[in-house]
Image: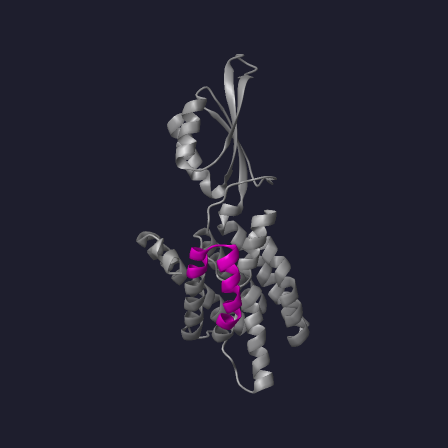
Amino acid sequence: MKKAIEGIPVNDYTTKLSVSIVYAILASIAMNFFYQPGNIYSSGITGLAQILTTLSTRALGFNVPVSITLFALNIPLFFLAWRKIGKKFTIFTFITVVLTSVFMQIVPETTLSDDPIICAIFGGGVMGAGIGFALKNGLSSGGLDIFSITIRKKTGRSVGSISIYFNALIIFVAGYLFGWQYMFYSALSIFVSGKVTDAVYTKQKKMQVMIITKNPETVIDAIQKKMRRGITIIHEAEGAYNHDKQTVLITIVTRFELPSLEAAMKKADPSAFVSISDNVKILGRFYEEEL
């Protein structure tokens, strides 16, 4: 672990720590302002922690805080993340989970609305924004995010969609134990959370880019200086109007990289024709930055 920490630049450390704090605050707001007052069960390990906390009151006669249960459930998942995802990722995930547990404990539970639908929608939106923001910056909120990222690396499916499948069992258990109406409200919250996560976490969305240019070498150099992407070259393309010879370049980028691509094209060949196909599916190798 010491070597992993020493390999992290100071500016990277401070950035990720700031992101951890932002996520912890958002997760605490979602939990204490919406989920708990509205009896809404969150997604993943957080939802399981809520279930165990509710059961502890019935079985043990006293309440085990969600913050403590959440941290305890994440401990075995840290080992999985260390082996399957990355050491830096695991270190900052540990920090994020610790901060989240602390903030959930110190942020007071506040009832903003008694309407469970409002609590489900806004709680899911705030939690999804926090999860997506953390993942976008190479962090995880812990819990099922670790499983989701591991499976996404193998299948290419989106993190939000994978989480929804995992969480079906969580909401069923919550409905069975505490009332079926809570299952439906929790399902709504998890759906909203998954969609917001996908909207914020743009690194997983792949886009096919086709470039028609008269200056292929300049364009290739500009793109590959901005990002690590392979490019397929098709020579001797001919325009139907002027019958001039051009070159077609095809590459795949993520939505997160799109601003870098646009900047490279403006510098290399502003007159090039660029066509972008959104959310394509990839079979084969596609480079992704290590978390």
26, 102: nearer the viewer: 102
Query: Which residue extends farthest left?
Result: 10
- x and y percentages locating residue 158 in the rendered image: 57, 50
What's the residue at 46%, 24% (across, down)? 272
Query: Seen in the image, is 3 located left or right of residue 156?
Result: left
- x and y percentages locating residue 122 in the rendered image: 52, 62
Query: Which residue extends farthest front?
Result: 3
Q: In which quarter of the image is residue 106?
A: bottom left
Residue 71 lies in magenta, yes or no? Answer: yes
Query: Seen in the image, is 244 located left or right of residue 91?
Result: right
First to last magenta residue range: 70-92
- Judging from the image, the colouring scheme is one colour
Asked whether residue 141 appears in the rendered view, the answer is: yes
Residue 192 lies in magenta, yes or no? Answer: no
Q: In which quarter of the image is residue 93?
A: bottom left
- Quarter containing the N terminus: bottom left
115, 68: nearer the viewer: 68
Is 40 drawn above or below residue 270 in the view shown?
Answer: below
